[in-house]
Image: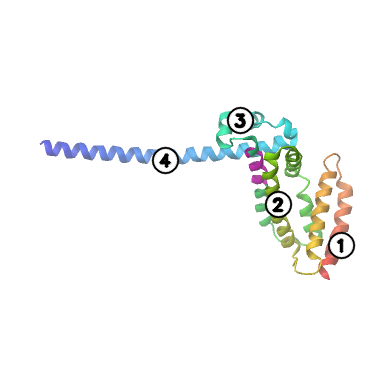
């Protein structure tokens, strides 16, 4: 009797342990999902705040409030302000890169140039600009931003070549594409203070002709 009773108790304990483990496994997934969702909200809020309020107005507390999370939760994901904002710009830059990679091949050189110029007229560019200015006065931030911008620059150049269907081994192609991206950045700066849409259309049309001629040679 004692042996049977002991066996039954052991079996019940194993069943209970297995059930608890299964419940724990089921509970872990939603917890991880919530953590990922919180991180994403913080990153998106950081970019929005940086674009709208600038570096000085975008504290961790402000971003946490915008994201609807506590300051403690924000610091759990990003221990420092620099961690938060460099991660935020990188997050949106990678999101932008994925979107561009999924675009169909533009129907014309003009369409490709328009797409590239569009990279520098949205909230990401505005946020990045504030980050560059802050990095010029914050040595700890400068190293991170410099490395990040170098990587994003290489990725953007590569995407530009793909969108234009260009081979940079050709004479002058690399310089032409880099000049196009520099021009697009300049148009983005001009658009920060006033709506520069009309002039931008004319410049884009001219640059599309220049790029087309350069790639044809």
Q: Which of 57 and 210 is in front in this view?
A: 57
Q: Nearer the viewer, mark 4 or mark 1?
A: 1
Which residues fall within the magenta stretch?
83-92
Residue 122 x %, y %: 76, 44
Quarter of the image where one finds residue 190:
top right
Image point 77% across, 48% down: which residue? Answer: 120
Compute the Cα span from label 2 to label 4: 42 Å
Q: Give residue 26's mark.
A: 4
Q: Give residue 68's mark.
A: 3
Residue 168 x %, y %: 75, 66
Which corner quadrant holds the N terminus? top left
Asked if residue 108 can be seen in this view, the reply is: no
Classify mark 3: helix, strand or loop: loop
Quick one: label 2 or label 1, which is nearer the N terminus? Answer: 2
Quick one: label 4 or label 3, which is nearer the N terminus? Answer: 4
Compute the Cα span from label 4 to label 1: 59 Å
Compute the Cα span from label 3 to label 2: 32 Å
Residue at numbered disc 1: 210
Sort mark 1 into few (<14), some (14-19) or many (20+) by Cα contacts within 10 Å. some
Sort mark 3 into few (<14), some (14-19) or many (20+) by Cα contacts within 10 Å. some
Q: Nearer the viewer, mark 3 or mark 2?
A: 2
Residue at numbered disc 2: 150
Judge whether residue 88 is colored magenta: yes
Residue 183 relative to residue 103: left or right: right
Classify mark 1: helix, strand or loop: helix
Residue 201 x %, y %: 86, 52
Residue 180 relative to residue 27: left or right: right
Quick one: label 3 or label 2, which is nearer the N terminus? Answer: 3
Q: Magenta region's main secondary structure? A: helix
């Amino acid at each position: 009797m004692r042996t049977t009773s002991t066996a039954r108790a052991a079996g019940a304990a194993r069943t209970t342990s297995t059930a608890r483990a299964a419940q724990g496994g089921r509970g872990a997934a939603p917890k991880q999902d919530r953590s990922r969702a919180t991180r994403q909200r913080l990153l998106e809020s950081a970019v929005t705040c940086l674009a709208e309020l600038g570096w000085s107005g975008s504290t961790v507390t402000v971003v946490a409030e915008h994201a609807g999370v506590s300051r403690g939760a924000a610091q759990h994901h990003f221990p420092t302000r620099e961690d938060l904002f460099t991660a935020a710009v990188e997050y949106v830059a990678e999101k932008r890169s994925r979107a561009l990679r999924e675009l169909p091949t533009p129907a014309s050189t003009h369409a490709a140039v328009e797409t590239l110029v569009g990279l520098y007229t949205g909230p990401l560019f505005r946020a990045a600009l504030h980050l560059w200015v802050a990095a010029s006065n914050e040595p700890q931030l400068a190293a991170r931003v410099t490395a990040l911008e170098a990587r994003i620059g290489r990725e953007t150049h590569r995407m530009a070549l793909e969108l234009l269907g260009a081979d940079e081994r050709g004479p002058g192609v690399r310089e032409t594409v880099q000049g196009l991206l520099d021009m697009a950045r300049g148009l983005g700066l001009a658009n920060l203070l006033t709506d520069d849409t009309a002039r931008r259309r004319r410049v884009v049309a001219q640059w599309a002709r220049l790029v087309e001629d350069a790639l044809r040679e």
